[in-house]
Amino acid sequence: MPRALIVFGTTDGHTAKIASALAIHFRSAGLTVTMGDAAGTAPDPAGFDAVIVAASVHARGYQRAVKAWVRTHAAALNRIPTAFVSVCLGILQRDPKVDRELDAIINEFVASTAWKPSTTKIVAGALKYTQYGFLKRWAMKRIVTKAGGDTDTSRDYEYTDWEDLRRFARTFAGSLQTSTARAHSA
């Protein structure tokens, strides 16, 4: 049974929820899954057949702990199938300029860590207005207003397409099982 490691960085908790959903989908596809927060519990990727790294975009970058973990383990990550799951509300805008900015953020992250993920998946995140402090709530509302998004700060909004995430997990798990089976039969 292939072993997958999911490493995540989260600021407001939603990327951890996405990582947990991936773990559930991978387990249902027959993978053995280990999860770890890059800020403290993420193990070394040695001994795993694949690694998925999930991080969210904040202030034009990803969590420092994720960047440090990936940089530390880039050589090992580049030898096995990997996926980078980028969580970002910008994907909802469907604006070519915003898409280019997100591509630039991803490319900067990959270049600065020397990691070459096998695949990249961009996933919409959430607005957790009720969990934000005054300044962050105000800033997020301004950003979202410009993008034409939800601005009622008395509630939270979750934009993740869970079905699309499930399809991604199944496809990744299927390709991992196929490559693992080929390796064991050779």
Image (cartoon, grey):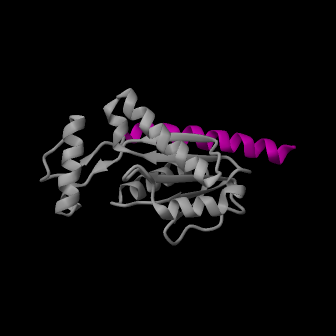
Percent x, y of residue 91: 37, 36
Percent x, y of residue 179: 73, 42
Is residue 29 visible in the rendered image? The answer is no
Report the side of 148 relative to 175 (left or right): left
Question: Which SS does the magenta portion mostly show?
Answer: helix
Percent x, y of residue 15: 41, 55
Q: Give the range drawn in magenta.
A: 161-186
Q: Please tell me which residue is depicted at 30% across the width and 49% down the height of the picture.
A: 126
Residue 76 position (above or below residue 105): below
Whether residue 164 appears in magenta in the rendering, the answer is yes
Which of the 4 image quarters holds residue 178? top right
Whether residue 64 appears in magenta in the rendering, the answer is no
Classify the position of the C terminus by image quarter.
top right
Which of the 4 image quarters holds residue 6? bottom right
Q: So how many labels did they put on this image?
A: 0
Q: Please tell me which residue is depicted at 19% across the width and 46% down the height of the picture.
A: 142
Percent x, y of residue 95: 35, 28
Q: Nearer the viewer, residue 67 or 10?
A: 67
In the displayed image of the protein, which residue is found farthest to the right? 186
Q: Which of 55 and 23 is in front in this view?
A: 55
Q: Which of 135 and 38 is in front in this view?
A: 135
Q: Please tell me which residue is depicted at 37% across the width and 53% down the height of the picture.
A: 58
Is residue 18 visible in the rendered image? The answer is yes
Residue 144 position (above or below residue 32): above
Report the side of 59 relative to 50 (left or right): left
Q: Please tell me which residue is depicted at 56% across the width and 67% down the height of the picture.
A: 42
